[in-house]
Image (cartoon, rainbow, N blue to C red):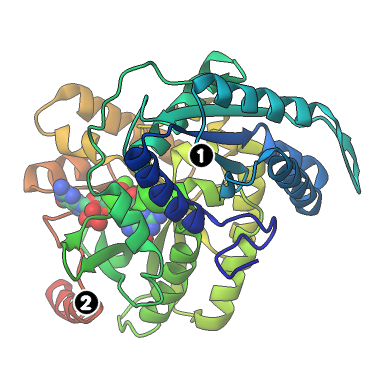
Amino acid sequence: MSTLDDDLTGLQSRRNFLATLRQQVNFSNELQAPLALLVVDIDGFAKLNAAHGYEFGDQALKYVAQHLRSIARAQDYVGRLGDNRFGLLLTRIMNQGHAELAVQQVLRHLEVPFQGSKGTVRLNATIGIAVCPQHASHPEFLLRQAEKSLELARETGVRWLTPPDTQQDEGFSEFWDLEIELDGAIQRGEFLLNYQPKLQARDLRPVGAEALMSWPHRARGNVPPDLFIPIAENTGQIRPMTMWALNTALRHASTWRHSSPLSVAVNIPADMVARDDLPDMVENALRLWGTPGVELVLEITERSLVSDPKQSFRTLARIRELGVKVSIDDFGTGYSCLAYFRDIPADELKIDQSFVQGMATDTASADIATLIIQLAHRFGLTVVAEGVEDERTLALLRERECDVVQGHLFAKAMRLDAFSQWLQQGAARVG
Ligand code: C2E
Ligand code: CA
Ligand code: CA
């Protein structure tokens, strides 16, 4: 096992597997020998973990890994692509039929129930296939084709699918390279946290700031979070990045000087809200960097509550027991949680920018914003409007008794030193 292998299963790690994929796709193109990629996703894995515990889940993953290894021939490769996702790379195959045979083998192996320490379960998998050169002749696009087939298989309720037979390598862009470069970016100290003020709507007193990540890249310039966060979420790199952000934001906030207590908000990705180790991570960060005058806020999107509300609610409740506030970000854009809204363990709602920015010109947006404010107040939550860019919108928000505002009208996200300075000047301005 090399250092690039996955600790749990001993299979190639995602990074290693992707490097192999690139190399093998090149060979495949040169030698004109087809190659197939199978992406194997274990179904209902979050539920299995919730029901039997993580140890049992880990045993199940090892079990699957072992079967995949036994299916692989000497010239094939097996890797772990994500929590419960595996890749099987079949090189030098004859045709697509060969890949389909391998799929049947995987499914047949999994028909044998898995016996773990806490009982016996039947594991199911959904599989996406893509063949080079039939479906793509670029490694990143091949992976995307296989993953797309997987999603489609899942949506349509079949066990496996191949993409339609159209070879088109469009859109492989910079995505692939960015993923590789993201690896180790934390260790190289490449990320920055910038702070955007949140102000009380009534008198524009600062109440805190939201930490926003940026990645000033040596060669590419500033890479926007909208580009790199989704990649990091896909690859699992978001976990160490979030831990870094939590610790750094708390450390920075402990240096802020202001006449009244301030909060610091950190964005938490959906995937981590449903996991039960988030409260421990938060508690550790607080133990290291927490200071009495600083309140920690976790901003989570409405979407993170949808996949497993019960588990997420439990996690959030534990987090609130630590004295940490929970804020629901981008509110109004998700598949709304209205049905269980009153049970959400949250303290704050952030109206999505799209409604805020439409308020002054579009009555539908203004109506939605008004409704969200009323709803939040009805359940005792603070309401924040983000993306406030003009005085007119501020006036409308004040009329509707929105509590807190954030946006370019007041300040953009700033480096730590600039924010500290802004705080001092702001304090002088407000008096
Ligand atoms: P978000 O959490 O909804 O953050 C608000 C975004 O709106 C930020 O963009 C902010 O700079 C921008 N913004 C604030 N006021 C205005 C305004 O008045 N006008 C306009 N046009 N934009 C405004 P940013 O920094 O590009 O971040 C984009 C998204 O990336 C964030 O949306 C968040 O989803 C994600 N993100 C950023 N930092 C982190 C992080 O540390 N962790 C995670 N998981 N996600 C992050
Ligand atoms: Ca946010
Ligand atoms: Ca937002």
Q: Residue at x 19, y 71 (%)?
A: 218
Residue 427 vertical position relative to residue 195 in the rendered view, above or below: below
Specify the label residue 41 is tagged with.
none
Most foreground residue, 327 or 66: 66
Which of disc 1 and disc 2 is earlier in sequence?
Answer: 1
Residue carrying label 2: 423
Q: Residue at x 66, y 43 (%)?
A: 311
Most foreground residue, 237 or 197: 237
Q: Is residue 414 left or right of residue 239?
A: left
Residue carrying label 1: 91
Dot 1 amino acid type: Thr
Few, some or many residues within 10 Å of mark 1 (<14, 14–19, 20+)? many
Dot 2 amino acid type: Leu
Q: Is residue 142 visible?
A: yes
Question: Could you tell me if the residues under marks 2 and 1 are in contact, i.e. CB atoms within 8 Å?
Answer: no
Most foreground residue, 229 or 373: 229
Q: Is residue 418 left or right of residue 277?
A: left
Q: Residue at x 80, y 26 (%)?
A: 111
Give the percent coordinates (x, y) of residue 345: 57, 46
Most foreground residue, 187 or 103: 103
Q: Quadrant of the N terminus?
A: bottom right
Whether ligand 1 has any atom under 8 Å from the Cβ at mark 1 is answered as no
Q: Quadrant of residue 115?
A: top right
